[in-house]
Image: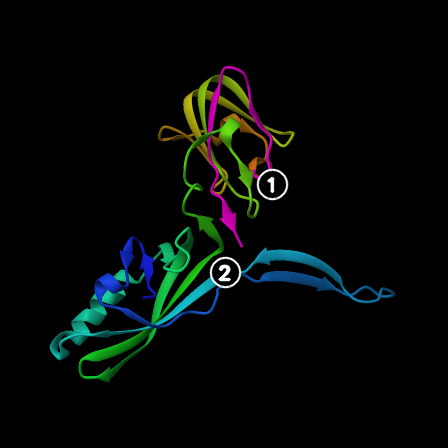
Amino acid sequence: MYDFQFNKMRACDVGLLVIKRPDIAIAEREYNKKYIKGREGSLTIPGCLKDLEWSFHCNYKINENIVLEKSRQLKAWLQGSGELVVSDDINVYYKVKHADIYDFVRVHKEIAQLKIKFTCDPFAYDNITGNLEVDHKELGINHGEPSEPEYLVKGNGVCVITVNSKEFQLNVSGEARIDTRAMLIKQGEEIINNKAKGRYTDLMLQRGENDVKVSEGFELRIIPNWRYR
């Protein structure tokens, strides 16, 4: 039976039945086009990827006296951000920005139908190895899109992290976490962005093999956040 899971809760566990499998969600890319006098065709500049949307048409059957109560429970669950997993692709998850319920109708005194739309980050994230901490020497190959990893640095003094010949420098006292997506560096609860020098985009892991090095005397572990389009 086809199903989906939102924030660790499966639709079937709350009595929802997916009536029709959703279309395959694909994130489209925006393009900026400029026409220049004397030039044939447009000058096309690739832009950002648009949000990705998953839509589900569901129904549920329940005692006619609590149909509306059940609808309130569903609306309380299906809101806000979180993680979405679809049952025919459980090796990845989607980062939900917000969820919406619409076309909520009662088709029978004991049966109601609704549509659910999840607006997500443009990528599918690896649910198997993408969230695991690994030593920088055991990173492996990126088979997907360029990723925004987290770096966990341990040591004292000025540390230089080199990713594909690009350097990022950080003054560390003990342990620090570099979140390249949020562009945030924390040492315990203290934010230490002011102790860094370099560009967060230089720390992204490119498609294929990546060469990652760290200054001698420091330990470096990586959460790669592998992702696919």
Q: Which residue is mark 2?
A: 51
Dot in front, 2 or 1: 1
Taking the spot 53% from the left edge, 21% from the top edge, the residue there is 159
Q: Give the mark nearest the N terminus, 2 or 1.
A: 2
The x and y percentages for residue 115 are 35, 73
Q: Nearer the viewer, residue 49 or 14?
A: 14
The x and y percentages for residue 78 are 30, 63
Q: Which residue is mark 1?
A: 208
Q: Nearer the viewer, residue 129 or 53?
A: 129
Taking the spot 37% from the left edge, 56% from the top edge, the residue there is 85
Left or right position of 80 against 204: left
Taking the spot 41% from the left edge, 51% from the top edge, the residue there is 91
Does residue 155 lie above or below 126 as drawn?
A: above
Q: Residue furthest bottom?
A: 108
> Magenta residues?
204-229
In which image quadrant can residue 87 be found? Answer: bottom left
Amino acid at circle 2: Asp
Amino acid at circle 1: Gly
Does residue 136 lie above or below 226 as drawn?
A: above
